[in-house]
Image: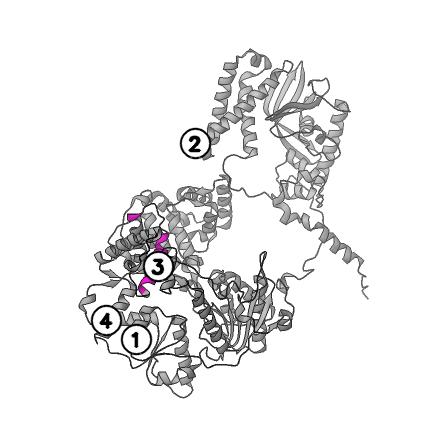
Amino acid sequence: MFCDYIRVFLNKVADLPLMLPPLIDITLFQQAINDDRLIITPNHRLAAKITEAWGIHCRSTQRVWHSPRVFSVDHWLKFCWEELQDHNDEAISGKAIVGSQQNRYYWERSISENDPEVSSKYAKIASDTYTSIQQWDLAVEQIQDETPALVLFKRWVKSYKRLLARNSLITIPDSWQAVIKAFETSLFHQEQEILTYGFQSTPPLLKKLLNSASDKVRTIEATPKETLGSVVSAEDPDHELRSAANWAAQKLKSNPDQRIGIVVPDLSNSLSKVARIVDEALRTHDVESLVNISAGTPLSQTSLVNSALGLIECLSVKKPLSEWLDLMYSPHNLLSEVPLQSKVNAELGLRKTRRFEHSFSEFCHVIIDEHETGSAPDILEPLAELRDGHTNFNREQQSFSQWAKSFSTYLTTLGWPGKRTLNSLEYQQKEHWHRVLQEFSELDNLGIEIGYATALKHLRHLSKDAIFHPKTADAPLQLLGLLEASGLSFDSLWISGMDSQSFPASVAINPLLPAQFQRLQKMPHCLPERELEIARQLLLGYINSSCELFFSYSSTKGEEVLQRSALLRDMPSIEVKDLIGNIAAFPHWLRQDNQTSLHEDKAPLFDQSIESISAGSALFKNQAACPFNAFAIHRLKAQPLEQPSHGLNGMDRGTILHETLFELWDIWKSSAELQRLSEKSIANQLDTSASKVLDKWAMHHPILRGQHYRMIEKDRLIKLLIEWIEEEKKRPDFIIEDLEVKKTASFGNLDISLRIDRIDRIDGKLLIIDYKSGLINPSHWDGERPKDPQLPLYVSACRPPVNGCAFAQIKGGNIRFSGISDSQLLDSEKGNRSWSESVALWHESMEALASEFTAGIAQMEVIHPSGVIYQTHLLPLNRWPEEPMVNKSIESKALKPKVRSL
């Protein structure tokens, strides 16, 4: 999502010339650069902006100039380490700095060797803690307070250091110590002067290093300004962000060549939201402007690399249905060439299984079977080859570089990154992915062979740790984190999130080290005084770096009431509406009325010679309940998508009950046979029939293959059948006339097909029986629009005519017959009309409903709400919840005076 919005910004203004002032006040550095002094910054971004500003300064008077000696601290120390290696110093001979992924592996191994019950997730916090101790120029052995966490940590550190020594590796702080020694022993020449810029705090080891590198170290301070910031109170975090975005858009509309900054403290965790709201604000004010976002997104979350990881993972891991669908419709693999209809059919096939997860083989089986009758069947040949050849995939043990080659081969075979030409962002993602694979291959220096799961875990870690920053041109609007904005210059700056809980930051004690030790050594985030001092430095830096300054905070966050930071208490307040006017919660293009026309129209007449539909009792039930839904379901074929589910649903259980009863009565044939059987014989036949039906269902429902769940379902089914059989035994003698008999009937121009569960013959008379596992109500058969017309339809379809009909309610704790006949074929018959009157009325109502349907009458009217309760999938189509609003719109249009044409 983040990358999508950046792409929008790029496409909008790719050719706009920008005449922007630099983000750095170069006069602060001019003398130092002219004197060839070394300038150190805390991050690469700040160093790059200083170099860029120097280039802009020199461009006006010179054609060529020397590049300034401006480095981020990491870049400079890496350069020093490489130079030290070139000197072939004995102290570091044959040693290398441990890489980030190697470091993770060694910490995880140290933890698992000492405390296997402890989660490997502690590897990161253990690594960060050890780095902090080293940067504070301390040793773990100096910590005396033996807390339980510290005891564990010391064990891990001991194993970690042993693993590093065994593999001739050192940590980054260890390399700093080596560089310090090189300066102290004059192996390196000292700098005349070192200048630092943009540091909020400096670890003791870095201070020691800088002091060893030069006898003169000073900090460059920004020129004090008289800027007086204003404080803006927003309703909530969303309103705060929308206010900042609209403020920036208005500023850029008035002058597109100024530097605007918006600071969002939690930018890295809200990239998509921030980018969306800023884009909406720019579009609302018709501003075409590039936007630069300082925070990146993990490479694993970018569309191209996420699809690559998904393709690799799918080969040997069961994946959720949603991920298979993402893969199937992705443009980044060979499935992009499969016709859309084949993919739709494959999706329906996968959904039909109702499984939450599918293996690679199961997915291939469905997609290949659906596609093989289509065009260009060779498209999926690579997929079939992989399916048939990857059975030993999980058992392979290879080096990291071999896995990298295997993964690249699989991706190529699966058509990654797709046939279409990559856009600029996707190309950058692809290049970054190749660098990650190279880094993955370099893990061979661990000297181990690993399996597929471990290889994929390390590759995912590397992809997640690699932060993707799209390459964009310079932009007038900068979206920055709290620290990234420090040291940069702006014409106007808006800093959000300045409530008392967030600024200054709260202390965060490291859980692995004693709190008292951390406070004594003034380690990171353990002293409120230190957090207050850093906040004051940041505040002063913002004041000195902008001509116009606004601080904002949310007055509420959820149910919590917030106050402005105490550091802002002396600043004047300004209302949002006074600053930018009223802003809408949504962009104006989402709130435009009357963008569509409303037409009352009948559906076309139904002609069964040219239109094929599935016509049964459900058609009449739907037409009676809601004509439009009947049209949508039976003529437009609008069906809900199957959703994954655990076990069987109510409809499944009802069908299993029907099938088991069919098996039983197909054997017994009559009540006399049932009465003749002993309880043991009945129990055996119940067990046999239930097992037969469940065996058939288990072929397509894997959950029934497990003994535990199958036994639960079987016991439930048999218990229900035993209760029902006792009810059957109470009836007068009967013979089974027909089971699961198919019937057809015609009502006007509509032919329907029906399947009747059972017809009994009692003293020469016929009784239709329909099994129901839910609640029943015979009154639903009556009226011009019966709620449940199933049995009335069955009666109308039977020739010769039957003498009665009944529902057999087979529901635990509520077993009964309920129906009507011409001669009291059932003991529980109720009704105010004779059988002949009921049949006549039923036939009349069925004819009327059939006539409505075939005439195309499909108005959106809910006659029986209970009849549409399971048709919520049609709401986006029938727009029933919007009916009052739509009717109001129609009425208002009808009341408007019409203009007569002349």
Would residue 862 be found to the left or right of residue 337 on screen?
Answer: right
Task: Tell me if mark 2 has few (under 14), some (14-19) or many (20+) residues whose alpha carbon lies within 10 angstroms of its own.
Answer: few
Q: Which region shows up in magenta?
A: 114-134
Which residue is label 4 attached to? 181
**Sequence order check: which comes first, mark 4 or mark 2?**
4
Question: Considering depth in this image, is 290 or 554 the residue closer to the camera?
Answer: 554
Residue 834 placement (x, y as % from top left) = 77, 22
Local SS, label 2:
loop
Residue 811 placement (x, y as % from top left) = 60, 27
**Sequence order check: which comes first, mark 3 or mark 1?**
3
Would residue 623 be found to the left or right of residue 35 on screen?
Answer: right
Question: Considering depth in this image, is 464 or 177 the residue closer to the camera?
Answer: 177
Q: Which mark is residue 129?
A: 3
Residue 492 placement (x, y as % from top left) = 53, 76
**Sequence order check: which comes first, mark 4 or mark 1?**
4
Question: Considering depth in this image, is 683 or 578 the residue closer to the camera?
Answer: 578
**Sequence order check: which comes first, mark 3 or mark 2?**
3
**Sequence order check: which comes first, mark 3 or mark 4?**
3
Residue type at numbered disc 3: Thr
Tell which residue pokes out farthest to the left in this image. Answer: 90
Residue 577 placement (x, y as % from top left) = 64, 70
Depicted 719 relative to depicted 409: above or below = above
Which residue is label 2 attached to? 706
Tell me if label 3 and label 1 are in contact, CB under 8 Å: no
Q: Is residue 341 visible?
A: yes
Main SS, magenta residues:
helix
Local SS, label 1:
helix
